[in-house]
Amino acid sequence: MEVPHHPDRQLWRYGLGEKPRGLRVLARTWVVERTFSWLGQARRLAKDYERLPETAVAMTHAAMSRIMLRRLARAAC
């Protein structure tokens, strides 16, 4: 996993820049939240029902496969 960092993140701590004011949105963080939202729409992934981690991984793969198949079917029409 790679954590995105803003290039000017903490230069102000070292006296190399001004302290940022307000909220700064990092690029492409919305992609993760959007994907979690899609997975949350799958009924079995809405809550943590699974006992084994392998089962949860399989359900995640099934949900993402369903999303991809729906997109491909829409593009084929």
Image: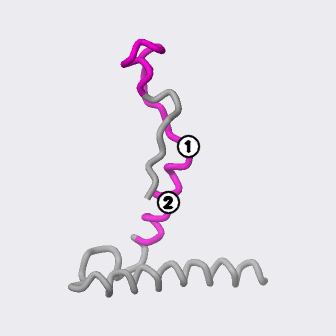
Helix or strand or loop: what does disc 2 sit on? Answer: helix
Relative to residue 73, is residue 19 depicted above or below? above
First in residue order: circle 2 vs circle 1:
1
| Numbered range of the magenta stretch | 10-39
Residue at the spot x=55%, y=43% of the render? 27
Q: In the figure, is residue 34 to the left or right of 54?
A: right
Residue tagged by mark 2?
A: 34
Residue tagged by mark 1?
A: 27
User: What amino acid is found at the position of numbered circle 1 in the picture?
Assistant: Ala
Helix or strand or loop: what does disc 1 sit on? Answer: loop
Q: CA distance from mark 2 to mark 1?
A: 14 Å
Q: Dot 2, crowdedness within 10 Å: few (<14), some or many (≥20)?
A: few
User: What amino acid is found at the position of numbered circle 2 in the picture?
Assistant: Arg
Relative to residue 22, is residue 60 depicted above or below? below
Quadrant of res 52: bottom left
Relative to residue 62, is residue 27 depicted above or below? above
| In-front residue for pair 73/57 | 57
Q: Please identify the quadrant where the C terminus is shown.
A: bottom right
Instruction: Residue 67: say if magenta.
Output: no
Residue at the spot x=47%, y=40% of the render? 5
Residue at the spot x=62%, y=84% of the render? 69
